[in-house]
Image: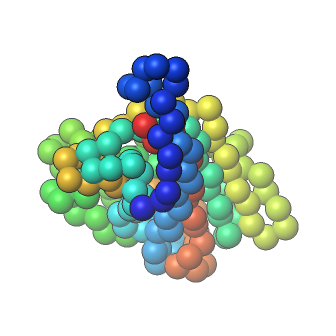
């Protein structure tokens, strides 16, 4: 677990300073063409998103590194559980089970205009987000899936990396 320090303000011990963290996860993808609505990779785990099991925080930013330079619109759907009722098959339609949908924190859309294209890769940054979350009892992790909202073709199993910027309470 990352080292963080709680700091009380004034005489009120309940007001604490939020600690910023960045946690990275990479989907293992099958090099292939994807279609709109397809799951890209499988479940992403953002370990220690909270300071303690059952803890809370706020997602403030997301950075997507795209080594294949596809620059396609993607959805990062975030959840408090591991989606035990949903079949998570890479390059197949993402269809969350009703029970899993109830654990959804929210979605972050990375649109095509948010990419910065370089010679042979690209990245996209989404900032000024305020997506609050509360981890489930016994866990400090949150989970995510990448869903294609376009038609990318990836050449390597490691073409994507997602970095989430958090403020942990």
| Residue placed most toward the observer, 155 or 125 | 125
149 relative to 90 in the view: left or right: right
Is residue 118 in sight in this rendering?
yes
Is residue 36 in sight in this rendering?
no
Tell me: residue 32, above or below residue 1: below
> Which part of the image, by quadrant, shows the C terminus?
top left
Where residue 39 appears, x then y in whole percent? 39, 60
Residue at image x 26%, y 45%?
54
Where residue 29 appears, x then y in whole percent? 47, 74
- Which residue of the protein is positioned furthest toward the front in this rendering? 11
Where residue 63 appears, x then y in whole percent? 62, 52
How many numbered circles does the render carry?
0
Tell me: residue 150, above or below residue 92: above
Residue at image x 20%, y 53%?
138
- Which residue of the protein is positioned furthest toward the right in this rendering? 119
61 relative to 2 in the view: left or right: right
Residue at image x 70%, y 56%?
123
97 relative to 107 in the view: left or right: left
């Amino acid at each position: 677990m990352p080292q963080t320090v709680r700091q009380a303000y004034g005489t009120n011990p309940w007001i604490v300073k939020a600690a910023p963290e960045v946690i990275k996860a990479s989907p293992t993808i099958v090099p292939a063409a994807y279609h709109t609505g397809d799951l890209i990779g499988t479940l992403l785990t953002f370990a220690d998103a909270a300071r303690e099991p059952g803890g809370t925080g706020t997602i403030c930013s997301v950075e997507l590194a795209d080594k294949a330079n596809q620059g396609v619109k993607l959805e990062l759907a975030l959840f408090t559980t591991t989606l035990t009722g949903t079949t998570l098959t890479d390059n197949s339609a993402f269809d969350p089970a009703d029970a899993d949908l109830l654990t959804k924190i929210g979605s972050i859309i990375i649109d095509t205009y948010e990419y910065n294209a370089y010679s042979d890769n690209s990245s996209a940054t989404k900032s000024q987000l305020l997506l609050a979350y509360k981890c489930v009892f016994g866990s400090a992790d949150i989970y995510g899936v990448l869903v294609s909202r376009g038609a990318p073709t990836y050449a390597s199993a490691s073409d994507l990396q997602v970095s989430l910027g958090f403020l942990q309470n």
